[in-house]
Amino acid sequence: MDGVLFDTTAVTEQYVSDQYPGITAEMQREILCGNFHEEVAKIPLPKKEQTEEEAEKFRILYAEKKSKAPMFAGAKELLLDIHKEGGILALNTSTFSHNCLPLLDRAEITRLFDFIGTAEISKSKVVKFKMIEEKYGSSGKRVIFVTDTLGDVREADSANVPTVAVTWGVHDRNYFNREEHKNLIGIADTFEELRKFIDER
């Protein structure tokens, strides 16, 4: 969702910067080279001291700001086309419901997703890939995962899920080309290129 469908990178980076004073943009991009929740727990900087009330207000403010993030041009059209053509759309996201559903609702695309796997279900995308496979009986030839982070590509490798990485989110080609990925079938710079990869499957 984040970085693929919605342009949320700036607001999320600001939230993390406010929580961990001194963290750099490069450090944040490196966090997304692994499982987000696991990597955040390893940040070698002290977290900003806050009361529980202050932290809750900050979380609410972040959710409000994020809910206003725009969709990338072409994202909604692609989802509508896939849905109309009978494709099943499932969302495998690291975000929690309160940071996810408002975005989908505002864009009027919630109904397009048959499965929405948020962090409440599991913080591991690998676990949710297995749930999707069990739910739909999907095999490698019938599913494709789309992401903008190296960490997701690595989790998809673990789950043996064919993946396309897009470059309009957090990570560019340099990240995806750092290493070999058995399930990375392509890198897309535009939604048109992404659609071609989907059609080829």
Image: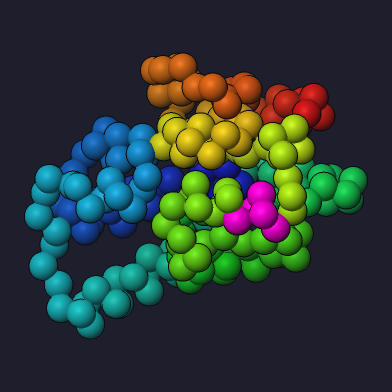
Of the pair 190 and 122, the residue shown nearer to us: 122
Residue depicted at 73% across the width and 61% down the height: 114
Residue depicted at 88% across the width and 49% down the height: 86
Of the pair 160 and 80, the residue shown nearer to us: 160
Classify residue 24 by image quadrant. Answer: top left
Q: Is residue 201 left or right of residue 1?
A: right
Residue depicted at 24% across the width and 73% down the height: 55
- Does 14 appear above or below 65? above
Q: Is residue 135 left or right of residue 65?
A: right
**Type of colouring:** rainbow
Picture coordinates of residue 35, whole percent (x, y): 37, 45
Residue depicted at 75% across the width and 65% down the height: 111
Which residue is the extreme one toward the bottom? 53
Whether residue 133 appears in magenta in the rendering, the answer is yes
Whether residue 149 appears in magenta in the rendering, the answer is no
Which corner quadrant holds the C terminus? top right
Picture coordinates of residue 149, whole percent (x, y): 46, 36
Picture coordinates of residue 83, whole percent (x, y): 83, 51
Picture coordinates of residue 143, whole percent (x, y): 71, 39
Q: Is residue 151 visible?
A: yes
Q: Is residue 99 visible?
A: no
Q: Which residues are magenta?
A: 131-135
Q: Is residue 5 left or right of residue 120?
A: right
Of the pair 155 and 45, the residue shown nearer to us: 155
Q: Is residue 109 left or right of residue 42?
A: right
Which residue is the extreme one toward the right? 85
What secondary structure predominates along the stretch shown in magenta? helix
Please give the count of numbered marks on the rendered protein.
0
